[in-house]
Amino acid sequence: MTLPKNKNVYIAILSIFMCQALWAQAVYEDERYVPETDTVVLKKLEQWQDLKFGLLMHWGTYSQWGIVESWSLSPEEYGWCERKMGSNPQDYFAYKKEYEALQTTFNPINFDPEKWAIAAKNAGMKYVVFTTKHHDGFCMFDSKYTDYKITSPNTPFSSHPKANIAKEIFNAFRNKGLWTGAYFSKPDWHVKSYWDPYFPPKDRNVNYSPEENPEKWNDFVNFTHNQIMELMTDYGNMDILWLDGGWVAKTPKAEISEWYKHRINNSPEGYLKHRIVNQDIKMDELVVKVRKKQPGLIVVDRAVHGKNQNYLTPENRVPEKTLPYPWESCIISGGGWSYRPDATYMSGREGIHMLIDIVAKGGNLLLNIAPGPQGDWQQGAYHLLNEFADWMEINSSAIYGTKPIAPYRENNICMTQNEKGNVFLLYLAKDGETKIPAEITLTSINPKKGTRIRLLGSKQRLKWLKQKEGFKIVIPPSLQDNPSCKYAWTFKIEQIDQ
């Protein structure tokens, strides 16, 4: 699936889909947040909020087909689940068998994580979150609890010296100074203790009653805990545990009843595309165990209200306002979350403006890039990161270690502030605008009398004039015609009136 020409339409459609899929996370800005109490975690979370820019990578055997990650295995009637590949996509069980056989042909011989780490670092990214396992259950790490993994003899790449892909990625990025985060899917559509082969899968959920089969469910809980503990024990210092599959959670009866009421009200004929099931995976116990191995670990149990969601993750969208808790927008850079052979990537202007908008509102940007079946990124991804690199070389001080300052944005000018009290005005250039305006006017803030203002990338002190409301900056022709960078220009004000 290629990105439509109108990316806003694409993002809106995908947001609608995901809101349907994750009903409990539908009202993002007003979602409840339970603050962390562990002082070590709080300190780390504060440091994470200063990082601002991270890399997310979805990668698995599904890249060989260029399809959405995992979801075609879910027997639900949504667009993102539609089966189009394989020799017989109309036969679900034949399709699942063929999908899982992709393990036997997965051989990404061009895999070079150092190349990715260098590109990410140059772009200004400060952390990476990698999909160690998605919902399909295929492990991109050497788990001893399954043979459905990258290091299995059934996988051609297992003979490669860098076969343990997750370990190689974490080491490469850590060596470049980036934080590391492990994405891990709580549901597992391959393991028999989640999708029991005695029953056909009904939807994304466990296909049997955990309450009526406590021994089997406990096997799955132990399996999940064991795999996560592998990642937290054998893969070096880990900064973030990023859990997906929010439907696998302890769910109170009242919430279940409300969920079905909501669904039935929107389905007069009574047909439900999927269910909600109480799936207590004992997350509180798990978090205690993993933090004994990784003190201060940031845990993101996505879409599950409670103390184990240290920050929230609005998906493929940017909130309209600042939020009263730590947050990160996870955004597709091109194509989809997973590899698309003909993906179109966002432009440098779009990406840089998005980062600025998110940072001005107090959030982080986690930008997804999907490696292909041969083990490399598409050229469009490298080009996009090069655009970030060029811009960050001049303007990074307006991004890192900054906080929002009201009103956050005035027209096409975003604002950030650092600990010294310096305020940065980030002018978002219009499409095709390559020349800085002769005057830039703001009404919402006022520089202190006598303070200095300059354009980042230039040492020249700029003239500014107080107005009846606000002030204006006068840009000399020499700077107007020779901006220090493309897409967004940053003006640093040393001090403002409070």
Image (tube, rainbow, N blue to C red):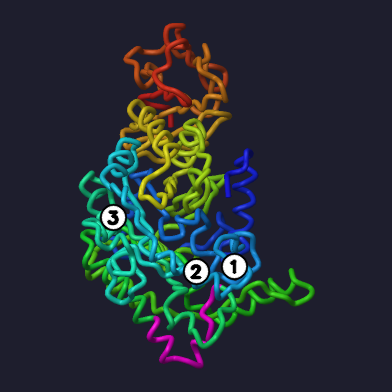
Q: Residue at x 44, y 48 (%)?
A: 368
Q: Does residue 408 appear in the picture of this structure? A: no
Residue at the spot of label 3: 43
In depth, the one of 448 and 158 nearer the eye is 158
| Residue 447 percent coordinates (x, y) | 43, 23
Circle 2: element type: helix
In depth, the one of 214 and 71 nearer the eye is 71
Residue 98 image label: 2
Q: Residue at x 34, y 42 (%)?
A: 125
| Distance between mark 3 and mark 2 Cα atoms | 47 Å
Residue at the spot of label 1: 88
Q: Which of marks 1 and 3 is nearer the N terminus?
A: 3
| Residue 203 percent coordinates (x, y) | 58, 75
Question: What crowding class fits label 1: few (fewer than 14 Cα within 10 Å), some (14-19), or many (20 or more)?
Answer: few
Q: Which of marks 3 and 2 is in front?
A: 2
Magenta segment includes 437: no
Q: Which residue is drawn at 52% across and 57% down?
A: 68
CB atoms at circles 3 and 2 under 8 Å apart? no
In depth, the one of 449 and 393 nearer the eye is 393
Circle 3: element type: helix
Displayed quadrant of residue 410 = top right
| Residue 28 percent coordinates (x, y) | 56, 57
Label 3 sits on what residue type?
A: Lys
Q: Which of marks 1 and 3 is in front?
A: 1
Label 1 sits on what residue type?
A: Asn
Tell me where the magenta segment starts and ends, as one range.
Answer: 204-220
| Distance between mark 1 and mark 3 Cα atoms | 52 Å
| Residue 359 percent coordinates (x, y) | 44, 40
Q: Earlier in the sequence, mark 1 or mark 2?
A: 1
Q: Earlier in the sequence, mark 3 or mark 2?
A: 3
In depth, the one of 67 and 41 nearer the eye is 67
Q: Relative to 143, does residue 14 appear above or below in the rendering?
A: above
